[in-house]
Image (cartoon, grey):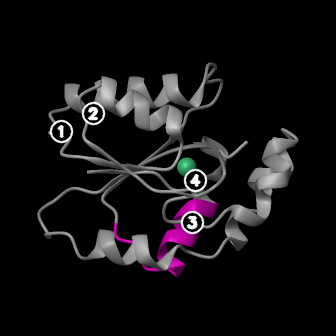
Amino acid sequence: MIVDVDGVISDASSRQPLAKARRWDEFFAGCPDDPPLEATVALVSSLVADLTVVLLTARPWHLLNDTLVWLKMHEVRWDLLILRPPNSGGSSRAYKATEVINLRHHGFDLLYALEDDPRNVEMYAESDVPCVYVYSGYYDR
Ligand SMILES: [Mg+2]
């Protein structure tokens, strides 16, 4: 199972004005202080124990330590964490589509995904990964 981070298990709503202004350094600097989205964290925890939980986020690689600390602090269940590698160009959608291919290549049977970005929801559908859309409001116009 694939789970997105921002807008799915982590509440980044207070940082959305920075995202809309594309002030990415400031946007990402705030992520350690985000509260968890308790309902989704509980949902992931309630899944059967032998299901592998893959956190697939477009957060950049330099946020690895901040993300690990946050996951531990909020007792999030996870097995594999994938952040965007350095010098990764292209869209979040293209990055996640590539990671879907990589996960399958490594033998993962992708049962479903939890995602709040409509573009990624569409990508999962096109990639034959059943996806549950989580409404965050971040992509409202
Ligand atoms: Mg998200």
| Count of numbered tags | 4
> Who's the residue at 51% across and 38% down the image?
118
Mark 4 and mark 2: span between their CA atoms? 19 Å
Residue for badge 3 = 10
Residue for badge 2 = 103
Q: Secondary structure at mark 2?
A: helix
Q: Residues within 10 Å of mark 4 (few under 14, many from 20)?
A: some
What secondary structure is the stretch in magenta mostly built from? Answer: helix
Q: Residue 108, labelled with which disc?
A: 1
User: In the picture, residue 104 is in which quadrant?
Assistant: top left
Q: Quadrant of the C terminus?
A: top right
Q: Amino acid at mark 4?
A: Leu
> Who's the residue at 41% across and 25% down the image?
97
What is the x, y in percent for residue 93? Answer: 51, 28
What is the x, y in percent for residue 26? Answer: 86, 52
Which circle, 4 or 2, is nearer the viewer?
A: 2
